[in-house]
Amino acid sequence: MIKIIGVHVPRRACLLAVLDACFITLSLLLAVAVRFSSFSAATSTSLAVPQVLVVALVCGLSLYYYELYDLGIVRQRSVMFVRLLNALVVSGLALGALYYLLPQLNLGRGIALVAAPAMLSLILGTRLVLGSHNLFRGSAERVLVVGTDEAGISTVREIIARPELNQKVVGFLDEKGENIGRSLVNPCVIGAVADLANVVKREKVDRIVLALRERRGNTPVDQLVRLKFAGVRVEDAHTVHEKVTGRILLERLSPSWFILSDGFRKSRFLSASKRLCDVLLCCAALPVAFSLMGLVAVAIWLDTGGPVLFRQRRVGLGGTTFEILKFRSMYQNAEISGPRWAVEGDPRITRVGRFIRKFRLDELPQLINVLRGDMSLVGPRPEQPELCALLEREVPLFVQRYSVRPGITGWAQIKYQYGSSVEENKRKLEFDLYYIKHLSVFLDLAIILETFKVMLIGRGAK
């Protein structure tokens, strides 16, 4: 996997993105050559770099929003073809609107008509060829888990559930060699920790994942050092789990992992840059947001009357409380008996409330909270003080969420469902800690892009 702005992306997905950019550019060059009946025209100034970049960016975003870099979808030919066709149609409509606003970027109708089928053929053909010849997969990386701790077992489950990682777990090594042959997930225990070097040689292992229940006195330090110098990768199970899932597994996680792990850096420059981006993006979004807010307000009023807005105390940066603004999505006095989490099919939610929750429109007034400085565009979702008090008692490290401003959207919101229990909120915290560890402006922008996709398909709302 390749780390890009704090997100670990499969190498084959990166390869597809690079190939797509190349094919989009090639299609435009071929279209110019055909349009003007001259190959020299394709390299002339008639095709300016900004024009090509705009087309590549719009087409790339469209392919991304139709999840054509999801390698599971790429393997389904019929689904891939329909999505690719839809993506190119949407790209054409978006470019048409952009050219109307900025005519200087227009390539010309003739070039677009020739380039579109060329793009479709090249992008589709590449995926079909790579898929049919199994070039996406190549030789799988062979992984050996040293130890039988739950963190290692959980990591193996995640690897097995993601064939796009192209990793094969050859088995586990038991701390004392007493359970050889026992199946823990799918691969079984194939040896003892003391036989590490021999097993690595026999199984042609590329990566070792350490998951010892007790490291003191059980870690084969000398063998690991020799294998490390021989080129075998050695990583802790929690680190591998983080890369694979985008969350920090809290199960049996030692404080030393947090202390010694990279990340969790917050500088004044980063804080100032994040705040500046929040203000600029809010100001840019407000004209469109106000139009949507007007429609939502009218719909709520017609459905259940006033009030349209809902105000509630939430816990923010440093554990301080603030008043959050939302469109009312529940019946009036729905929480008169006290706060509780929303659940699937919650009877407290109105008809309009169900719709605006699904597409996250109830969160739009929180742009005002962002401008006030109570919230950020991206960060952990703020909870009510009563629920926070419960989660602080039940969930280790929950208070670390208060080290950053809460957000309208966040890493947990795009990666996980709505938390409606202590256990679900513990899982959400694992995603929030990953975000805090890799905090950056670029990661925020990536989350905002993914949030638009979540809004379009209405995923994760309750």
Image (cartoon, grey):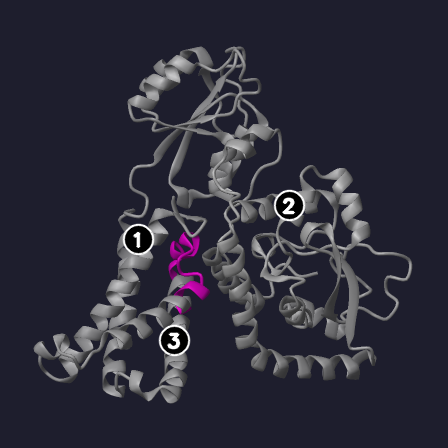
The relative height of residue 45 versus residue 445 in the rendered view (above or below) is: below
Query: Which quadrant holds residue 381?
Result: bottom right
Residue 274 rendering spot, x and y as whole percentages: 52, 60
What residue lies at 31% left-to-right and 24% top-to-bottom?
204
| CB under 8 Å between discs 3 and 1 | no
Q: Residues within 10 Å of mark 3 (few under 14, many from 20)?
A: many
Residue behind mark 2: 429
Please tell me how crowded label 1 is: few (under 14), some (14-19), or many (20+) other residues with Cα within 10 Å: few
Q: Amino acid at mark 1?
A: Leu
The kind of residue on which mark 3 rests is Ser
Q: Residues within 10 Å of mark 2 (few under 14, many from 20)?
A: many
Q: Position of residue 56 (x, y in %)?
A: 31, 70
Cα separation between marks 1 and 2: 32 Å
Q: CA distance from mark 3 to mark 1?
A: 21 Å
Q: In this image, 266 relative to 303: left or right?
A: left
* Earlier residue among tags 3 and 2: 3
449 shown above or below 393: below
Residue 260 visible at all: yes
> Where are the magenta residues, as a range?
62-77
SS assignment at label 3: helix
Query: Is 446 above or below relative to 46?
Result: above
Q: Residue at x 50, y 54 (%)?
A: 270
Q: Which mark is residue 125?
A: none
| Residue denoted by label 1 | 15
In contact (CB < 8 Å): disc 1 and disc 2: no
Gap between marks 3 and 2 measured at Cα: 36 Å
Q: Quadrant of residue 345?
A: bottom right
